[in-house]
Amino acid sequence: KQEVTQIPAALSVPEGENLVLNCSFTDSAIYNLQWFRQDPGKGLTSLLLIQSSQREQTSGRLNASLDKSSGRSTLYIAASQPGDSATYLCAPGKLVFGAGTILRVKS
Amino acid sequence: GAGVSQTPSNKVTEKGKYVELRCDPISGHTALYWYRQSLGQGPEFLIYFQGTGAADDSGLPNDRFFAVRPEGSVSTLKIQRTERGDSAVYLCASSLNPGLAGARYNEQFFGPGTRLTVL
């Protein structure tokens, strides 16, 4: 059974910092890994999807990497802004999610 | 070009009652997923449809939960004899066609959820 761990559970940083959010998973037999953000009381918004054949994917200030063999993915957020404040969730494969990292960016 | 929609947005019911939650996926998406989310947790998988059939229903917690997708588009999640422990946000997602390789076929898009409260 796939188990997903996201570290840290919560993070509070001043505006402008570069951030690293970590996702580890136990079953490396995945076809892809997706990162989402969730604002309070809202559904999930897709940020990036990395296919198993890829090592990284970029969208604007976001960069996600995937190391299947070690069961790890990293979401890098450059030059963080208060609008980035949300919960960030990873989903290795399509049906299992981590508990998320709660991010607060202070202005 | 609408996204995934879910109705109602909020549902309050009494213990023992029957409820139905509806999901309208993105037009043309063959796959539809139901999850539920409790406070402070990630979404927990319930059931996944490919077309009209349930491809994986291993996440349904017990036989009080049932879901249908009769025409391969709209889906209804049905909960019988609701219990207080069923209170959660029920999320629906769809994807184009997870049977095919490629990000555009596998990316999941979520609706805003239905908040179910069982008193």
Image (cartoon, coloured by chain):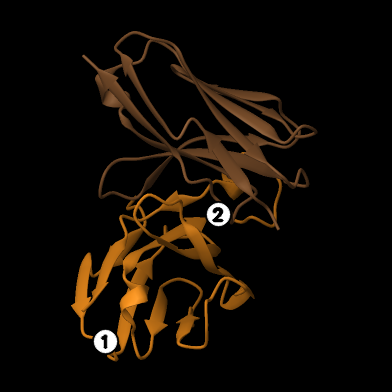
Q: Which residue is mark 1?
A: B15
Quarter residue B18 falls in: bottom left
Q: Which residue is mark 2?
A: B96
| B119 displayed left or right of B23 | left
Q: Position of residue B10 (x, y in %)?
A: 20, 67
Return the chain for callout 1: B
- What amino acid type should be assigned to the residue bearing mark 2? Leu
**Please, is residue B4 above or below residue A89 in the view?**
below
- Near-viewer residue (B25 or A22): A22
Q: Position of residue A98 (x, y in %)?
A: 53, 45
Asked whether the viewer can see residue A22, the reply is: yes
Where the C terminus of chain A falls, by quadrant?
top left
Q: Secondary structure at mark 1?
A: loop
- Near-viewer residue (B76 or A106): A106
User: In percent of the image, x 71 and y 58: which residue is there?
Assistant: A1
Q: Position of residue B58 (x, y in %)?
A: 62, 73
User: In percent of the image, x 26 and y 24: which residue is there?
Assistant: A83
Asked whether the viewer can see residue B102, the reply is: no
Quarter residue B117 falls in: bottom left
Q: Position of residue B64 (x, y in %)?
A: 45, 87
- Near-viewer residue (A9 or B64): A9
Return the chain for callout 2: B
| A93 displayed left or right of B70 | right
- What amino acid type should be assigned to the residue bearing mark 1? Lys
Q: Colour of chain A?
A: brown
**Please, is residue A11 above or below residue A92 in the view?**
above
User: In percent of the image, x 37 and y 59: which residue is there?
Assistant: B38
**Which disc is residue B113 wearing?**
none
**Please, is residue A18 above or below residue A54 in the view?**
above
Chain assigned orange = B
- Closer to viewer: mark 1 or mark 2: 1
Dot 1: within a 10 Å radius of its alpha carbon, few (fewer than 14), some, or many (20 or more) residues? some
